[in-house]
Image: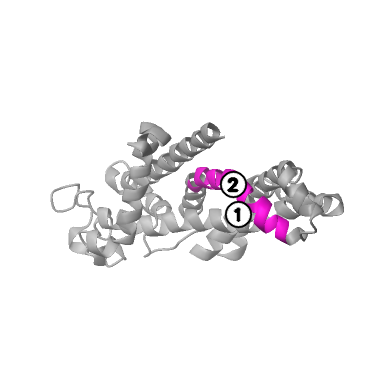
Amino acid sequence: MSLVKRLGLPGTLCLCVVVVFALAAMLAPFVAPYAAQGIGTPNISAKFQPPSAAYWLGTDHLGRDMLSRVIYGARVSMTTGVLIVAVSLLIGLPVGLLAGYFGGWADEGFMRITDIFLAFPALLLAVLMAAALGAGMLNCIISVAVTWWPWYARLARAEVLVLRNQPYVEAARLMGVSPPRILLRHILPAALRPLGVQAALDVGPALLTASALSFLGLGVLPPTADWGQMVDAGRPFFPARWWYAVSPGVAIFLLALAFSVLGDALRATGRRDA
């Protein structure tokens, strides 16, 4: 009951959606009706079967069960979204901490570098990076993370500019505590909460961006199940075989919406606690 009070009913429901998708992804070999088809094994005799008791979400052009493909696709899509945010945070957080704490030339140099990346439209830069690096899950993560880390750098810098003048930080500085220790022990823990909330908000957009790259053929390649690639594969057969493109599309929509609402709920909780 306390969780519902803190997150609210929409936030709690969206947390349940995220947990269901995460459990399905982790337990895919056990919960997928046709695990072999989920990893890409074709079943030509059953191609383009509409949704039925045997195939709840129908089958694709190779006869593979769409429900199994969506479940296995959750593994790739969720992992890609989370890793994009994690890599962006790992790059942007140190840059923002150093720029905000030391100021001067460090601040000027780091912030001008971030401005260079922010000058380009994020999706366009990600597409260009992915096209240069080639298709693949790792390259997709790198391409999107390169465009996202400046936002975390700016957010971390803004937090540090406030925290570095707090009395407990000033006291530690007067006692001779080294700057790295002040950053790691006194400033970083306080800065992590707003960054964590922002990271939760960004998993949904990161998933959407990665799916867009896969839709363009610049992300995960078949036979690996990926929601963006599955939407692209089902597009030529729409609307006659609507379930092919709709099933992964609905999965993308639900998970992105769940992360977005959950992030908003966490942010509201942080404001109440403050």
The segment highlighted magenta reads: 181-203
Q: Earlier in the sequence, mark 2 or mark 1?
A: 1
Q: Please say whether residue 119 is visible from this viewpoint.
A: no
Regarding residue 137, the answer to whether it shows in the image is yes
Find residue 144 and report its image quarter.
bottom right
Q: Is residue 176 above or below residue 169?
A: below
* Nearer the observer, 125 or 206: 206
Q: Nearer the viewer, residue 70 or 267?
A: 267
Task: Please say if 176 is above or below 154.
Answer: below
Residue at left offset 44%, top offset 58%: 79
Q: How is the image coloured?
A: one colour
Main SS, magenta region, reads: helix
Instruction: Name the secondary structure under disc 1.
Output: helix
> Outermost residue toward the right?
105
Task: Return the x and y of residue 154 as percentages of the image width and height.
Answer: 70, 45
Residue at 53% across, 37% down: 270
- Rendered image quadrant of residue 242: top left
Q: Which residue is label 1 attached to?
A: 89
The residue nearer to you, when weighing 218 against 45, is: 218
* Residue 47 x/y as whole percent: 22, 57
* Residue at x 22%, y 63% (from the top left corner): 44
* Quadrant housing the N terminus: top left
At label 1, the amino acid type is Leu
Question: For this rendering, which residue is in front, 23 or 224?
Answer: 23
Mark 2, Cα crowd under 10 Å, few <14 / some 14-19 / many 20+, is some
Look at mark 2 in the image and give the residue it sits on: 195
| Quarter occupied by the C terminus | top right
Tell me the CA gap for discs 2 and 1: 8 Å
Image position, residue 221 (x, y; %):
44, 63
